[in-house]
Amino acid sequence: MTNDVSSPAAVVRAFMHAMELMDFDTALQYVADDLEYTNGPNPPVRGPAGVRAELAPFFAPIEENQFVIRREAVAGPVVCIERLDRHHIPQGWFELPVTGVFEVTDGRIVYWREYFDMATIRDALTRLTAGA
C-alpha cells in the first residue's frame, strides 16, 4: 500500500479512491481477509474475493466513476461516509446517494456496509436506457 494509512479515515479514503478508479487490486489491499461486506440489500460477503465477486459485475459496464464525499464522521475505528456516487455508462451518467459504514483495525477494513435506495438505481438506468 502506498497511501497514508495512519488513521482509519485515511485507510477508508485510500480505499474509496482506488474503488473510484476501479482499481480492485489496489483497493483490496486495504481489506482484511475476514472483512464482512454488505452491499445494500444483498447478503454479506467475506474478504477481498467476496468484495471483488460482489462489485466486479456492477462495475463492468461503468466507464468512469466520481465519488463525491459530502460528509465524513469518525469515531475511533469507525468511519461513516455520506457520498454521491456518479457512474458513467455508455448511455450517460447516473447518480446514487450512498452512505458507507466502515470499521478499520490495524490498517485494514474489517467491516463495510453500504446503504442506498435500489429504486434510485433502477429508475436512473430505466431513464438512461429509454433515452430520456
Image: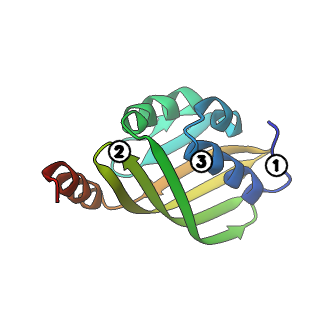
Give the quadrant of residue 68.
Answer: bottom right
Give the quadrant of residue 59.
Answer: top left
**Distance CA(mark 3)–CA(mark 2):** 29 Å
Q: Is 20 situated left or right of 122 in this image?
A: right
**Of the image marks 1 and 3, the number of the one nearer the N terminus:** 1
Q: Crowdedness of circle 2 by 10 Å Cα count: few (<14), some, many (20+)?
A: some
Residue 122, given in percent of the width and then of the height, sits at 22, 54
Q: Which residue is mark 2?
A: 89
Q: Secondary structure at mark 2?
A: strand
Above/below status of 98 relative to 18? below
**Distance CA(mark 2)–CA(mark 1):** 32 Å
Q: Which residue is mark 1?
A: 5
Q: In the depicted view, which residue is nearer to us: 38 or 29?
A: 29
Residue 4, given in percent of the width and then of the height, sits at 84, 49
**Residue placed at 86% from the left, 53% from the top?**
6
Q: Crowdedness of circle 1 by 10 Å Cα count: few (<14), some, many (20+)?
A: some
Disc 3 marks a residue whose amino acid type is Tyr
**Of the image marks 3 and 2, the number of the one nearer the N terminus:** 2
Quadrant of the snapshot with the C terminus = bottom left
**Of the image marks 2 and 1, the number of the one nearer the N terminus:** 1
Q: Is 92 situated left or right of 20 in this image?
A: left
Disc 2 marks a residue whose amino acid type is Ile
The tag on residue 103 is none
Q: Which residue is mark 3?
A: 111
Q: Nearer the viewer, mark 2 or mark 1?
A: 2
